[in-house]
Image (tube, rainbow, N blue to C red):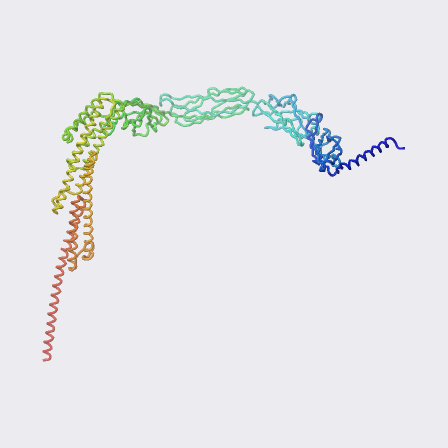
Amino acid sequence: MIPDWVRNLLVRSAIGAVILVALVHCVGIAGASDLTVNPSSIAVSFDFNQPKDTAHYEVQRTITITNTNPDPNSTISGAISSIGGDISITPSPNYFLLRGGESLPVALTIVADPSASQGTQSFTINVGEEHVTVTVTITYYARIEVSLSPAVGKIDFGEVRHGTTPTSNTRIKIREIYGYKSVAVVLKISGDNNWVTSSLSGTISIPAGGESEEIEFTLVAPDDPDHNDYSWTFSVSSTTSHTTISPSSIHLEAYILMPPKLGRLDDEKLDITFDEPKGTVSRYVRDIDVRVRNTGDETMRVSSSVSQSPGGGISINIVDSPRSVTEKSNRTLELRVVAPYNAPEGTYYGKVYVDAGDAGSGTVEITIVIKWPVDFSIAPTSIDFGSIELEERGYETKQVEITITETYLYKSVRNLRFSTTGEEYGNWLKAEQDFAEIPPGESRTVTLKIEPGLEAVPKDYAWTYNIGAYEIAAKHIAITAKIVPLNITKAIDGLQSFRGTPLYTNYPSSESIIANGVAMLEVVESSEIGTEDWAKIPVLMTGTLSLLSSLNDGIVFTEAANYGSAVESLSSASVSTATIESNSDLNNGVLSGYATAISTEADNTTAAVLRDEAKLLELRGWTLKKAVEYALAIDDISSLNEEENVLEAALSYQYAAMLYGLLNDKEKRLENVYEGSVLMDRHDELVSDATDLRLRAETSIATSKEKDLTRIWDSYLLFNPYHYDTFVASYRTAEDYLETASQKYKVAGERFLYEQTEGELNQLQSELRSVLILFFIACGLYGVLFLYAITRIVRGTMAYLRDVYEREVGDVLVTG
């Protein structure tokens, strides 16, 4: 008999089979190979870094399930497994049903219990017939907590007497607070010394989440610390991985009381400057304070003495020496230095010994610098040069003697320095001295000169003149001077001196210039003149005097036939006229009237003199030209005097052209320029022809000497009578050339070349005479020799004839 539950199961199975067959026929079922899971593996790590009692570690990861069958009618379904225990993995959802092409995200919640073991574990999650591998890694962390008991910021031993061994009231507690693992920690105390020790040291083990370790500290204070404040650092470190320590160090400090100790002794320096004249005081006394310090915390006993004397008659005395110095304080050791007035200048060294027993000892070096004073006095302390007038070549020069006296009698005044402050033109003041230094107590004199330049304007000037020296501050002299840019008396005398001159005699209009100038200067002398007028009046008067002088010189030079200098002076007069005109516009109405009158008469007089001189020069040029033309026409230049030549005539025309140019007479200027140019061309032609004739003469002489004469040492002689005619002809030709050249030079006006050619002509004639005299003497010798030869020939012939005759007579006698 079949049980009811079996029967029901069979019925349900049959129904399910029928439905499944129907679905297969109607839709179709996807295969397991169409299911994919992404990702197929997951790695998770947990850092156990929370207290174990309250910690919770959980993460989520997501996987995606996909039906890869493209048929939308196909389906795939299944369950997703989970993991339990210390590490649990729970999927959500835990079942899937997917049509073809569908995907489903599934969240995996991974939870690690704080009691889970450290390390890596792998788990498999079944997704239908597929699998997902989950790897879980757990790492234990530790945290060391360092605290103070009682809870203060540092460990302070407080005040500690030297040589004692106190223990700190504050202790350190160390414990691990996460509770996962025990930790090995290293305890260390660092500092400038090893006076502090701890109850635990080196490497110790702190249990996981267990009781704390308590540490106390002991200080072994030294007998002789060198200061009060000391500190150390207690540090905690670990060799265990993944361990943090907070805090990792604790500060320890102590104030250790010191025994009495002699502090730093500072060397002292004392400058003694002798500030009184030598011999007026017998000695100089100065005090020095030396600080004696006790850096300890107990009273210090001290004593002092002078261990080294400075020498040079200088002494160091102890005025007041402290017997004791309380803790952390200082006292003054009072010293007195006595130097005689005649102690040599220089640097001296003394020493004071300070003895504090067990607290120490030391030496204070006292440097004493003796400085001799040097200074000087000056007289006078103020100088007034008064009025300084303009002279012919500039302003007059004045000078004052300044006496400089050394006052301290110790050493010489060296390297005097002079400078000026105050108004402009301080360079007018110049000091002259004939000494290098001033010996102690002696005096020297400096000459101070004032030399105003032409840039000076009429006003009162004031300066401060400074005289200093090496090691001496400058002394000051107040200097004043008044500039008067015109010597009025001299200017009036200068104007009046032109009365009676050739200019005054020949040109009465010059009297107007003189009279207006004198009247103007008289007004200037009695009036106050503005600065602008003062800038013009000296130039105006200087120009007026220069004009009168130039015009008069031009007339005088013309009378002396010095026409070049005359034209030069008249050109200067024209410049002076322009200067007068440009400075005649004055602000003072009275002076302006005189100045305008002077300017007008200056123009008129200058024009009259220039025109007369120009006409004279033009007439002179014409006269000289005609004299030369007449002499050439009659071929007789012997009647020409020295100035009657082409060059003088040309220069006269040129001078006249220059003067007509100053008068702006263009027509007359061009006429004279033309005449001068024609004459200069004629002059150049004459000089060129004469020079050519001289060259031809030299060529003729040289040729004759080479062909006709015989050179014996430095002399030329004519020995061959057959060369007589050619020699004489060559020299006569050269003589004609030189004579013609000298005449041309004379007509041209080249006096130097004329005289040079005349000298050559005279030398040629002298040489010709010498050669001919020697030739005639040689010819006489030739005749004597010829007669001698004829006589010898006749005598020889007669002797020969006699011999022939006698031979013939003898032959007759023999044959007869």
Camera sees residue 139: no
Quarter-wise, where is residue 346 in the image?
top left
Q: Residue furthest bottom?
A: 816
From this view, report whether residue 397 is shown above or below residue 787: above
Q: Residue at x 44, y 21 (%)?
A: 287
Q: Is residue 476 above or below residue 753?
A: above
Residue 438 placement (x, y as % from top left):
32, 27
- Residue 359 placement (x, y as % from top left): 54, 24
- Left or right, 198 with reference to 25: left
Image-quadrant location for residue 285: top left
- The image quadrant where one finds the N terminus is top right
Between residue 52 and residue 769, name the one nearer to us: 52
Residue 767 or 57: which is nearer the viewer? 57
Q: Position of residue 637 (x, y in %)?
A: 13, 45
Confirm whether residue 257 shows in the render: yes
**Image quarter of the C terminus:** bottom left
Across and down, in percent, residue 15 comes to 82, 33
Depth check: 294 or 227 in front? Answer: 227
The residue at the point 19 percent across, 48 percent down is 689
Q: Is residue 481 left or right of residue 359?
A: left
Query: What residue is drawn where x is 13% and y is 63%?
Result: 786
Q: Quadrant of residue 641?
A: top left
